[in-house]
Amino acid sequence: MTIKIGFHNLFRSKSLDEVAAWAHKVGFETFELAAGPGALVDVEKVLSGNAGAIRDPCKNNSIAITSISYCVNHLDPNGRDKHNAHLKKVIDAARQLGVGIVACFVGGTGAAFYQEMGLFEEHFMPLVEHAKDNDVKLAIENCPAGGFNIGRSPYFWREIFAASEDSPHLGLEFDPSHLVWLQVDWNKALDEFAGKKKVFTLHAKDTIINKEVLADRGFYEPGWWEYKIPGLGVVDWKALFTTLKKHAFSGAINIEHEDGAYLANDDKIKEGLLIGLKTLQNSLAASK
């Protein structure tokens, strides 16, 4: 059982080699890399034989690429065909890079849930089959996406996995931060789905709740919650690692940095990532 700590690369002005060298120097072990249009992983270049431009800088700096992400709406007819075609290429690129996990949304249309599940079976299950054919796993990121991602909470996960006939190629990129403000017991959810071996990888992101704003405005209005670096919110990271160890989880937990207090420039980004790294390292060491 090995749990490795890394981050979703968000540096735009630095080369991958430079970022990987810094990451290794300070103690990170893994990367998640984005693969949308204009992102770091250019799937067309990878598929045309240039995988080394992505793989080698990480390998040379002892950083493992544990997942590639492409998070868009795969059910909405506005763009669905384009998005689904690109996700297939991302899966193909992951195979070329030797990366076993592709993180994604499912998507949604805002229709009744039974209608959404019909769309899931028609449009998303072929993507799961494509992943299976390439020996890649799809990990659903549980971001609500404004209500347009049905893979957002335990109730929906059970339905999705049942519809997929419990495919071993479909699971979760578990992120507790979203569940905090959704008022879902994130540790109970983690216990259930890690126990079912459906947690393939994790995002480390924290959340703070401003109870005074919530009490004044109610939950329909913005401003009562905010994403933070791990350790600066309410998530109990020691408890999270204890639950992962309970189920012998082996894999990566990558910081997804969306904390506005540490995004002004590259130095602030590094400062935030280092706070998160220390929190996760200490919590992992203290967990049972």
Image (tube, helix red, strand yellow):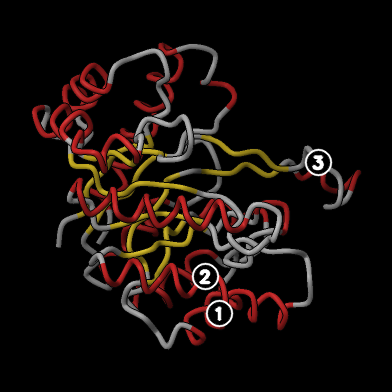
Q: At which x and y percent is residue 248?
A: 21, 70
Measure the alpha-carbon separation of dots 2 and 1.
Answer: 6 Å
Residue at 51% in and 58% down: 84
Q: Is residue 117 left or right of residue 171?
A: right
The residue lying toward the viewer, choosing from 67 and 182, is 67
Q: Looking at the image, is 77 positioned above or below residue 17? A: below
In the image shown, does 270 or 85 lie closer to the viewer? 85
| Residue 79 on image: x %, y % | 64, 52
Residue 78 in the figure: left or right of residue 8: right
Which of the marked residues, 1 or 3, is nearer the chain's N terminus?
1
Position above or below: 228 against 102: above
Tag 2's secondary structure? Answer: helix
Q: Secondary structure at mark 1?
A: helix
Q: Is residue 69 above or below residue 251?
A: above
Q: Residue at x 72, y 52 (%)?
A: 146
- Of the numbered discs 2 and 3, the one sitting upstream in the chain is 2
Marks 2 and 3 sit apart, C-alpha to C-alpha, by 31 Å
- Identify the residue position indicated by label 2 in the image: 124
Q: Residue at x 20, y 28 (%)?
A: 53
Q: Nearer the viewer, mark 2 or mark 3?
A: 2
Residues at marks 2 and 1 touching, judged by CB atoms closer than 8 Å = yes
- The image position of residue 26, as x and y in percent, is 21, 24
Three-letter code, disc 3: Pro
Q: Which mark is residue 121?
A: 1
Crowding around mark 1 (Cα neighbors within 10 Å: few <14, some 14 to 19, many 20+) is some
Question: Which residue corresponds to mark 3?
Answer: 222
